[in-house]
Amino acid sequence: MPVSRSSTKLSPKISLLLAAACGLAVANVYYTQPLLGLLADEFGVSVSAIGSIVMVVQLFYALGLLLIVPLGDLRSRKRMTVIQLLLIAAGLLAASFASSFFMLLAGLALVGLTAVVTQVLVNLASALAAEEQRGRIVGIVTSGVVVGILLARTFAGFVSDLAGWRAVYLISSLLTAAAALTLLAVLPPDSADKSRLSYGRLLLSILRLFAEERLLRTRAALAFFVFTAFGILWTPLALPLGSVPLSLSPSAIGAFGLAGAAGALGALGAGHLADRGWGERTTGIALALLLLSWLPIGLLHHSLPLLVVGILLLDFAVQAVHVTNQSLLFAALPAARGRLTGAYMVFYSIGSALGAFLSTQAYAHYGWSGVSLLGALVSLAGLIFWIATQKRRL
């Protein structure tokens, strides 16, 4: 018998379990970045081609946002969550035993496609929570995303130092499967209040929403610029850090993820500023900081402390724009949050994928200076685009 959303009250333990599942799912997207140098050596892949791993994961993530996340309006999100987590575990298992670069790519593509369970989990928490606790529960669950990103690169570097890169995917596979079975056992059903739209009409409604809403188009474009810059930094960063003369270990490389996450956590208040009507001002300042961040980032071979400063600035700026984008969109179109999530996050994935591809090409041909210049140009383009949108508002 369907359980009414208003009659369900989630315990703190279940809320934390949902947050942990969110963190596990999103972390699987980021494990590869500090391991790129090891993977290139293992499979004999060139530096210019190794970025295709990150690009493929992000493109399949975008596909999942469009094709899988909207299904939550038609089918049980609990069932979807369990199935997706088990598929992630299968993809990770395939990656851990990969005997060829193609097999690794196929396993991680499956991970990318089904890692959108993160968005399903957030929607599931909102659907299951009682009205009076919904905001707090969703806040707890979404915090798992930040923690997952925080720990992913550090975990991957530490485990690969101890037991090799294959152990990273094997351990995560086991943890993800355990999370799936635990959620299956403890979560109540969520079959109430499902849309009567067909799947095809649901997908068409996303396209129609994008065509009709200028705010969505503008904010999606900004997401594209900032996450392209994000991908340009984080995809090839392990390559110069792990090479002579720095020759840092995978765990030391992964530790730079802590600086990035600290910067991202510092920007969580951007949504509050947007609620007070300062969304555009916050966006402009963040985009200026994004451009500025490439100056210390470009000095990687001269000063690692300056690199950390650049990472803090960049991740702060990216997260500030991202949080502001979502706050403005959800405030303007509260009845379409699910479809907005799918439409908006596609540009996050496309930007991350493009950044991964372009940055590894730039590093292969022009070194870290080429990567830094590319990142600065993309960031400048984002700032110019935002300025142009302000002129159109006047």
Image (spheres, rainbow, N blue to C red):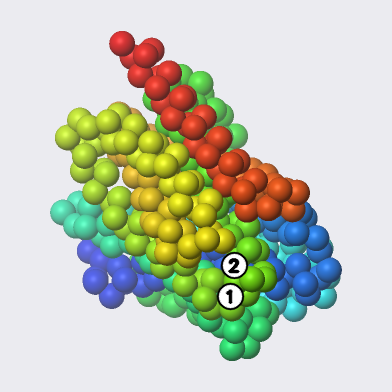
Q: Which residue is mark 2?
A: 241
Residue 75 in the figure: left or right of residue 371: left
Q: Which residue is mark 1?
A: 248
**Eyeballing the image, is 288 above or below 122?**
above
Q: Position of residue 285 (x, y in %)?
A: 32, 36
Q: Position of residue 303 (x, y in %)?
A: 48, 62
Residue 57 in the figure: left or right of residue 69: right
Nearest the viewer among 48 and 202 is 48
Locate the C terminus and report the quarter of the image it occupies: top left
Circles 1, 2 touching at the beta carbon (< 8 Å): yes
- Based on the displayed image, in which of its 4 quarters is residue 77 positioned? bottom left
Tell me the residue at 38%/12% (across/down): 392
Nearest the viewer among 357 and 105 is 357
Tell me the residue at 39%/57% (across/down): 309
Q: Which three-letter amino acid code belongs to the residue tagged 1?
A: Leu
Q: Position of residue 243 (x, y in %)?
A: 67, 69
**How far apart, in angstroms, are the residues tagged by discs 1 and 2?**
6 Å
